[in-house]
Image (tube, rainbow, N blue to C red):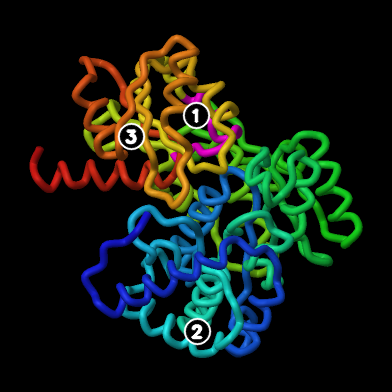
Amino acid sequence: MPDRPADPAFAASLDYLYGLQRFGIKLGLENIRALLQRLGRPQQAFASVHVAGSNGKGSVCAALAEIFARAGVVAGLYTSPHLHSFTERIRVAGAPITESEVAALTAEVRQQAGAIPVTFFEFTTALALLYFARRQVSWAILETGMGGRLDATNAVTPRLCVITSLCRDHSGHLGTDLAAIAGEKAGIIKPGVPVLCAPQPEAALAVISARATALAAPLFLSGRDFAVRDGGDGLIFRGFGIELDGLRFGLAGRHQQLNLGLALAAAVLLRRQGVALPDAALRTGVAGVRWPGRLEWWQDGRSILLDGAHNEGGARVLAGYLAEQGLSGVRWVVGLKADKDADELLAPLLPLAGEVYCTCPPVDAAYDPERLAAAARSAGHPAKLLPDPAAALAAALADRRPGEVVLVAGSLFLVAAARDYLMTLERDGA
């Protein structure tokens, strides 16, 4: 979501950074390695945890970062994309980088980059790693942008790797089948470095297991080596010789139990590596984690649900959550990026929808909302075309009857725009 900064230096930095998107998505490590070399190899100044996957990466990273914070361990967190401000991507001890720091570091990294044709994501990754080194963090938690093997974050050699749930996504870059996608995600695995892995389809798990075996990397599987299950009072984590009961997770949805398990398993393995993460930090960390835009009920109660579901896996999870909550006939505000498979996202959610409000998220290339409306109508749903997310959400809210839920889902950029609109309503007292 584009920022609207008041600081001229920060605004100029963003103009430059977003301008790097002209290089597009260029997977490969040559440029990022060259840039990090010029910056003095900042990635070697701290230990790191590297997280790849299709869904759940951000939730796992956020939960682990909260555990570090509750334990008093100064850690950096690098995630993408952001909802409202670029500064959300880079955090230390929970606090986002300041606009002035972004401006200063952008100028420095730009000077060092010289003629290296770095992409937006390569530049921001280098900036984040340099910031973490300057802030003298002990640990950094790094979320891949896309894939893993050739992702800019893979220039780091971590102490722990995590692979979350996989599904078909970014097929134009990662491959059209799960085995190919798993090969790209498993590219983060390093020789001898432990790997935590969510449950995967058989074809994907076979690829991940083969990569781990080839590199003598210990592989720990959710459901086999560790697990989270419902208990009489809260959730129970069991694995690696410990059991924690009565757990509360700050994120909604049954699927989050898998992400909770990955975060807690990561904390336990890091504790084995000497990181001081007591049980109390694990408990309070997972209870206190928040990750806006992911199964987020807006502040007005349970009438507006925001979710960044943008691929088939995310859509299935969202549909499962709606069914668990007994929700159907929701007024669905939807908009996708042009590179998404609309059929795979619509299929699980349309049966739970009533009227559909089709629009364009604020991205360079959006999926044609007329095609979304046609698909909804062919499935028996009334559909409206709206020019932007604010108009679509306003229409859905105006049409809503007592007891009905408005759902905003289909792209995290769509969710960000919806949150902007809702916050504007709150500021204006509407």
Q: Tell me the quarter of the picture where residue 377 sits.
A: top left
In this rendering, does residue 48 appear at all?
yes
Secondary structure state at the residue bearing disc 1: helix
Q: Which mark is residue 297?
A: 3
Disc 1 marks a residue whose amino acid type is: Leu
| Quadrant that contains the N terminus | bottom left
- Give the quarter of the figure containing the C terminus: top left
Q: Observer-nearest residue: 391 or 86?
A: 391
Q: For the point 55% across and 76% down, which residue is it? A: 126
Alpha-carbon neighbours of circle 1 within 10 Å: few (<14), some, or many (≥20)? many
Q: Which residue is mark 1?
A: 318
Q: Is-magenta flag for residue 166?
A: no
Magenta region: 308-321
Q: Is residue 320 visible?
A: no
Q: Secondary structure at mark 3?
A: strand
Q: Cβ–Cβ below 8 Å for labels 3 and 2?
A: no
Label 1 or label 2, whichever comes before in sequence order: 2
The image shows residue 218, relative to residue 127, as above or below, that is: above
Residue drawn at the location 76% of the way across and 34% of the way down: 201
Q: What is the three-letter code of the residue carrying label 3? A: Trp
Question: Which residue is identified by label 2?
Answer: 109
What residue is shown at x 49% (from left), y 89% (from top)? 111
Mark-to-mark CA distance, 3 and 2: 39 Å
Q: Is residue 239 left or right of residue 297?
A: right
Relative to 66, residue 205 above or below: above
Picture coordinates of residue 320, whole percent (x, y): 53, 23
Q: Which residue extends farthest right?
A: 214
